[in-house]
């Protein structure tokens, strides 16, 4: 399977900047690695209309109804959307999302046919207290318990140590591989038929100068990238095209 690079643009770029980026990126993109992009939801149609797979950065646990301000995973799928990022640490931190609460969002999004990128990761304090693996185990169990097995083939996990997001500090390849292999063992125990095949992305200050050593690790299948996905040139480099 090809390595997968996912650009999480967070709340950045207006419509003009999105369009210019996509033109510049597509001019040089070879498809050597898969490239998916989650822009601000308001501009997701621009990505849908390009050849890249388009995502949103959150969605409702409901498909429709009286939920003012929410984005429906069903509507997004109908308009050609492909994936949703759920449980990003910024959502856990600023919007009080919990793994138990995310369980329902993951269920609805998968049932509606979206691919879910479910994010897990520890804070620096938790790492220093030796809690990394137990915390990530809990995040996985709480988020994934009682999901419909048939839909889990469209699940991707992103390991994003909170201390590495937007800080310029990257987990070393060995630190990342240790957690990825742990995640793989949990997925394989929980879902014997496809745990081995589930893609596990690393996120947290992935840049052109550290991407290759991260991707060389056995259980790192790609990256979830914030800052370095905002410039077409850098994202091309992450996709192996510069
Ligand atoms: P970063 O963000 O690449 O800027 O560290 C990663 C993320 O938030 O997914």
Image: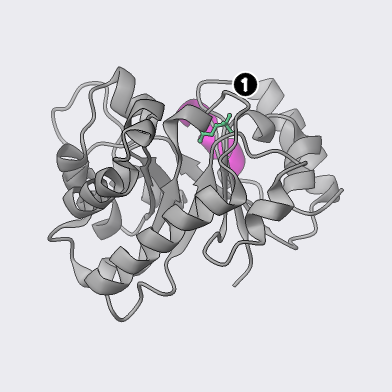
Q: Regarding ligand 1, which quadrant of the image does it lie in?
A: top right
Q: Residue at x 60, y 51 (%)?
A: 173
Would residue 27 be found to the left or right of residue 15 on screen?
right
State which region is magenta: 41-47
The crowding category of the residue bearing disc 1, from other C-alpha atoms within 10 Å (few below 14, some 14 to 19, many at least 20), is some
Query: Looking at this view, is 87 or 14 the one in front?
Result: 87
Q: Is residue 231 above or below residue 84?
A: above
Q: Main secondary structure of the magenta part?
A: helix
Q: Residue at x 48, y 43 (%)?
A: 55
Mark 1 near ligand 1 (CB under 8 Å)? no
Tell me, yes or no, whether the highlighted magenta stretch contains residue 26: no
Q: Is residue 72 visible?
A: yes
The number of numbered discs placed on residues in the rendered structure image is 1
Query: Looking at this view, is 60 or 15 the one in front?
Result: 60
Q: Position of residue 25 (x, y in %)?
A: 78, 42
Can you tell which quarter of the image residue 89 is in? top left
Q: Is residue 241 above or below residue 32?
A: above
Would residue 153 be found to the left or right of residue 242 on screen?
left
| Element type at mark 1 | loop
- In this view, the residue farthest toward the bottom is 193
Q: Is residue 51 visible?
A: no
Tell me, yes or no, whether the highlighted magenta stretch contains residue 44: yes
Return the residue at label 1. Answer: 13
Q: Residue at x 29, y 64 (%)?
A: 186
Query: Looking at this view, is 19 or 237 the one in front?
Result: 237
Rendered-image quadrant of the N terminus: bottom right
Can you tell which quarter of the image residue 206 is in? top right
Q: Position of residue 157 (x, y in %)?
A: 40, 54
Way the structure is coloured: one colour
């Amino acid at each position: 399977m090809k390595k997968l690079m996912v650009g999480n643009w967070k709340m950045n770029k207006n419509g003009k900047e999105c369009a210019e980026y996509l033109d510049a990126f597509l001019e040089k993109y070879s498809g050597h690695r898969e490239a998916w992009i989650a822009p601000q939801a308001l501009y997701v149609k621009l990505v849908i209309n390009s050849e890249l797979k388009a995502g949103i950065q959150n969605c409702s646990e409901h498909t429709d109804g009286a939920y003012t301000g929410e984005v429906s995973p069903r509507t997004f799928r109908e308009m050609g959307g492909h994936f949703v990022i759920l449980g990003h640490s910024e959502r856990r931190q600023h919007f009080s999302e919990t793994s138990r609460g995310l369980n329902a969002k993951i269920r609805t999004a998968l049932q509606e046919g979206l691919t879910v990128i479910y994010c897990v990761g520890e804070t620096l304090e938790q790492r220093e207290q030796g809690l990394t693996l137990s915390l990530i185990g809990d995040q996985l169990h709480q988020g994934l318990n009682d999901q419909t097995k048939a839909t889990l083939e469209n699940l991707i996990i992103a390991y994003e140590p909170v201390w590495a997001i937007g800080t310029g500090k990257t987990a070393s390849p060995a630190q990342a591989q240790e957690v990825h292999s742990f995640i793989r063992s949990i997925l394989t125990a929980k879902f014997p038929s496809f745990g081995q095949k589930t893609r596990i992305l690393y996120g947290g200050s992935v840049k052109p100068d550290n991407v290759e050593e991260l991707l060389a690790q056995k259980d790192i299948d790609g990256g979830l990238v914030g800052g370095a996905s905002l410039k077409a040139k850098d994202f091309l480099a992450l996709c192996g095209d510069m």
